[in-house]
Image (tube, rainbow, N blue to C red):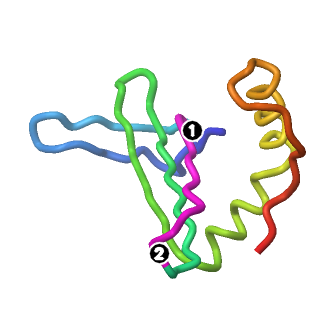
């Protein structure tokens, strides 16, 4: 994924200013284990400009929107990843099922 800004954006500090036209997705991480006793989910997103190496990092944590994002993003790839871990001997064989509340 990539975002192209409507107009260029200046980032950095006075000594290291960079003008960006776009950023592309570098990483997304979900943490499903909120603070003890709280149902919060945390999502972390890093966007990057490969030409300059500039990274922008954003974190969201709540109990409504980020769990909904996880439910949309989880999809079949999570099961496929767990199957790969089993196949590679990193996890013992077992049944894979969606997480229930």
Which residues fall within the magenta stretch?
Answer: 25-36
**Left or right of 78, for residue 22:** left
Secondary structure type for disc 1: strand
Q: Residue at x 84, y 33 (%)?
A: 93
**Left or right of 59, for residue 99:** right
Q: Quadrant of the N terminus?
A: top right
Residue underneath mark 2: 36
Q: For the residue carrying disc 2, how many other residues have a C-alpha within 10 Å: few (<14), some (14-19), or many (20+)?
A: few
Q: Is residue 59 magenta?
A: no
Measured as percent of width and height from the top left, residue 66 is found at 62, 68
**Left or right of 29, for residue 76:** right
Residue sitting nearer the eye, 32 or 20: 32
Above or below, comparing residue 22 to residue 69 in the picture: above
In whole angstroms, how far apart are the C-alphas of marks 2 and 1?
A: 30 Å
Q: Tell me the mark number nearer the camera, choosing from 2 and 1.
A: 2
Residue underneath mark 1: 25
Secondary structure type for disc 2: loop
């Amino acid at each position: 994924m990539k975002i192209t800004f409507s107009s260029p954006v200046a980032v950095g500090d006075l000594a290291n200013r960079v003008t960006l036209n776009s950023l592309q997705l570098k990483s997304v991480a979900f943490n499903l284990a909120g603070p003890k006793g709280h149902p919060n989910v945390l999502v972390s997103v890093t966007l990057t400009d490969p030409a300059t190496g500039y990274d922008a990092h954003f974190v969201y944590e709540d109990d409504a929107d980020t769990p909904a994002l996880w439910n949309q993003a989880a999809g079949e790839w999570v099961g496929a990843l767990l199957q790969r871990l089993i196949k590679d001997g990193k996890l013992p064989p077992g049944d894979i099922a969606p997480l229930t509340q």
